[in-house]
């Protein structure tokens, strides 16, 4: 089992691990690299300035994910962009490291490395938190989102408009997470079979005929054996903008930005997903 | 290099009970993205980070940077940190006076800038973490740092006892329909900041789950979505109320100790609260205000 987890881990974090071996091309480029060179600094400036919103999104997603009891939708674009930015920054740092000439360069290097560590930590903890949740309720998630997506009927569906989709698609598990979940489920079922299920009688006869069920199956519908994530628990959250309308039961007044919210997670989940509320870890 | 590698933030999902303040926590980590002004003592071109670009750094020119960067530079004596406007003695004294006043049930929200009345000053969400880091790293950059430190500790103390009172009231009223009301009051009024969330989140959540009748009812709620969750909540409340009534009846006749085990399944901090309340009614003593309300409600239920 640990092999598989290791493999999936290295798939998920492969991007991160490979940073430590900079490509040969970047080594070659280091010869004529100068920290104060205008060209190089402007090009990297641009990429960072364009994409700085992704860092905020990642922090937000991390906070929500850590505080929520069940898996939240994943924005794969953010994760891919952050991995790209990390790679970019790592190669910049390694180029700097090979040409430390002045105290200023050493300082720059030091600061870049600290930020790399911080961002890597956030990304890794975000992904690991998700994996931990998937592991806990792997069978439930695979039945709720068989292909990693959640499909909800579109309320604004227009029959005559060919553009409008019938269902709204939300990604809950990325391809890699889905692959991990499937592998983990197989191992889990095998483990349960060898330790417990094979010692049980094959079928149990109920009082009424035709209702006998299979004790050796983990996902027998009538036994309700698959636990879902507990969305009925309370969470603490904070309003991110003024005038958030309460979508749960009861006539709740509108909230102001910064107000604390104590509510059942199932009630506020849609507001967390669309970014009106953030959860407090 | 940074303090991060030595003390990873605690992000353990299930375990939020330990309210230790001295530990490096996730709140501290998050607070380090707050912007502060520094006056660098070195020259350096713009630094392009993943999060944002900072700089250029010109000696003597003040520039905003995230807290972690400021702290790192300050540790190397490469800059001076300009303390944020709320970290001054006069403003914090105002906050302290507000929190001290027994008439103020809510937390301090905002007030005017001590020198410029046009600016509304609010305490930032992570103000405890920020203040502690700044006082640790650069006591020399802050005016009258010792007295500020004392005031901050007093404010923390007052806010903590206020939080405990809020929780008490919440727990006493969660059994009836007024629970919704109190919860809303909590939502609207409590200005919890990062540290309070860290300290009280675990106990609040557990308390409310216990009132709902936490033993196993949450099972499979995820499947039914929101509707099932609400059913579970109502069910829990009804159960809790019935139990209370049973207890009252038991008390009305002769004193039966059998009522005690009956309450066991709720298994929450509220029991202490509640047990206290019951004992007080029994002895016919003068009741405190919230307790009297609770007793009236009980009578109404009968």
Image (cartoon, coloured by chain):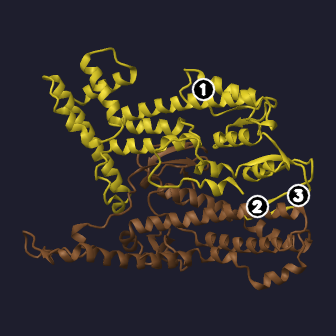
Chain colours: A brown, B yellow
Residue at (35% x, 56% y) in the render? B227
- Please state which of residues A182 and A198 is positioned toward the viewer in this rendering: A198
Q: Chain of mark 3?
A: B
Which mark lies nearer to you, 1 or 3? Answer: 3
Residue identifier under label 3: B56
* Image location of residue A224, percent across then percent down: 25, 66
The CA distance from mark 3 to mark 2 is: 13 Å
Q: Chain of mark 1?
A: B
Give residue B268's quadrant in the image: top left
Residue at (58% x, 74% y) in the render? A13
- Please state which of residues B55 and A25 is positioned toward the viewer in this rendering: A25
Location of residue A35 with respect to B11 vertically, above or below = below
Q: Is B61 left, or right, of A180 in this rendering?
A: right
**Few, some or many C-alpha atoms within 10 Å of disc 2 (few <14, some 14-19, many ≥20)?**
some
Q: Tell me the number on the disc at residue A227.
A: none
Asked whether disc 1 touches disc 3, contact meaning CB atoms under 8 Å apart, the reply is: no
Location of residue B50 with respect to B18 vertically, above or below = below
The CA distance from mark 2 to mark 1 is: 37 Å
Q: Earlier in the sequence, mark 1 or mark 3?
A: 3
Question: In what quadrant of the picture does the N terminus of chain B appear?
Answer: bottom right
Residue at (91% x, 64% y) in the render? A102
Question: In what quadrant of the picture does the C terminus of chain B appear?
Answer: top left
Q: Earlier in the sequence, mark 2 or mark 1?
A: 2
Asked whether disc 3 touches disc 2, contact meaning CB atoms under 8 Å apart, the reply is: no
* Image location of residue A32, percent across then percent down: 90, 79
Residue identifier under label 2: B52
Disc 3, SS:
loop
Q: Chain of mark 2?
A: B
Location of residue B30 with respect to B259 vertically, above or below = below
Residue identifier under label 1: B99
Asked whether disc 2 touches disc 1, contact meaning CB atoms under 8 Å apart, the reply is: no
């Amino acid at each position: 089992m640990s092999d598989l987890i290791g493999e999936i881990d290295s798939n998920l974090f492969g991007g991160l691990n490979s940073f430590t071996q900079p490509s040969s091309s970047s080594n070659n480029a280091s010869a004529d690299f100068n920290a104060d060179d205008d060209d190089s600094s402007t090009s990297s400036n641009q990429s960072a300035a364009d994409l700085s919103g992704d860092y905020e999104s990642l922090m937000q997603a991390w906070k929500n994910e850590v505080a929520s009891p069940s898996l939240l939708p994943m924005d794969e674009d953010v994760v891919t962009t952050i991995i790209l930015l990390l790679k970019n920054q790592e190669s910049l740092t390694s180029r700097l490291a090979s040409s430390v000439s002045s105290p200023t360069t050493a300082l720059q290097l030091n600061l870049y490395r600290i930020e790399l560590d911080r961002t890597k930590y956030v990304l890794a903890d975000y992904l690991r938190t998700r994996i931990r949740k998937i592991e806990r309720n792997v069978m439930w998630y695979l039945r709720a989102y068989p292909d990693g997506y959640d499909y909800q009927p579109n309320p604004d569906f227009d029959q005559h408009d060919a553009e409008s989709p019938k269902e709204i698609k939300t990604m809950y598990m990325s391809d890699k997470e889905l692959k991990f979940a499937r592998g983990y489920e197989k191992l889990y079922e095998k483990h349960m079979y060898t330790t417990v299920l094979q010692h049980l009688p094959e079928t149990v006869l109920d009082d009424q005929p035709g209702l006998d069920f299979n004790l050796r199956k983990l996902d027998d519908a009538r036994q309700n054996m698959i636990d879902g994530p507990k969305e009925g628990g309370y969470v603490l959250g904070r309003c991110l903008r003024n005038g958030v309308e309460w979508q749960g039961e009861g006539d709740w007044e509108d909230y102001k930005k910064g107000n604390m919210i104590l509510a059942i997670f199932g009630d506020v989940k849609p507001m967390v997903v669309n970014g009106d509320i953030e959860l407090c870890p | 290099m940074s303090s991060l590698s030595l003390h990873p933030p605690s992000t353990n999902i299930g375990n939020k009970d330990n309210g230790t303040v001295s530990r490096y926590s996730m709140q501290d980590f998050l607070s380090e993205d707050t912007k502060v002004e520094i006056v660098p003592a070195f020259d350096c071109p713009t630094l392009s980070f993943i999060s944002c670009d900072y700089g250029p750094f010109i000696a003597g020119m003040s520039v905003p940077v995230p807290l972690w960067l400021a702290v790192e530079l300050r540790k190397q004596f490469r800059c001076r940190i300009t303390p944020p406007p709320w970290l001054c003695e006069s403003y914090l004294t105002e906050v302290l006076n507000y929190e001290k006043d027994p008439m103020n049930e809510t937390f301090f929200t905002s007030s005017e800038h001590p020198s410029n009345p046009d600016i509304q000053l609010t305490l930032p969400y992570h103000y405890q973490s920020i203040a502690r880091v700044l006082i640790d790293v650069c006591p020399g950059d802050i005016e009258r740092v010792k007295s500020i430190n004392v005031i901050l500790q007093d404010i923390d103390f007052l806010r903590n006892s206020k939080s405990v009172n809020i929780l008490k009231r919440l727990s006493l009223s969660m059994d009836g329909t007024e629970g919704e009301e109190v919860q809303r009051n909590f939502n609207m009024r409590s200005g919890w900041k990062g540290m309070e969330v860290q300290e009280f989140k675990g106990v609040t959540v557990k308390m409310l789950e216990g009132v709902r009748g936490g033993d196993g009812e949450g099972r499979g709620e995820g499947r039914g979505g929101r509707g099932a969750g609400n059913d579970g909540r109502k069910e829990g409340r009804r159960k809790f109320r019935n139990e209370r009534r049973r207890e009252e009846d038991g008390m009305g006749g002769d004193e039966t100790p059998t009522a005690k085990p009956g309450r066991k399944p709720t298994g929450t901090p509220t029991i202490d609260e509640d047990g206290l309340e019951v004992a007080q009614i029994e002895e016919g003593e003068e009741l405190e205000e919230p307790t009297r309300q609770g007793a009236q409600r009980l009578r109404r239920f009968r």
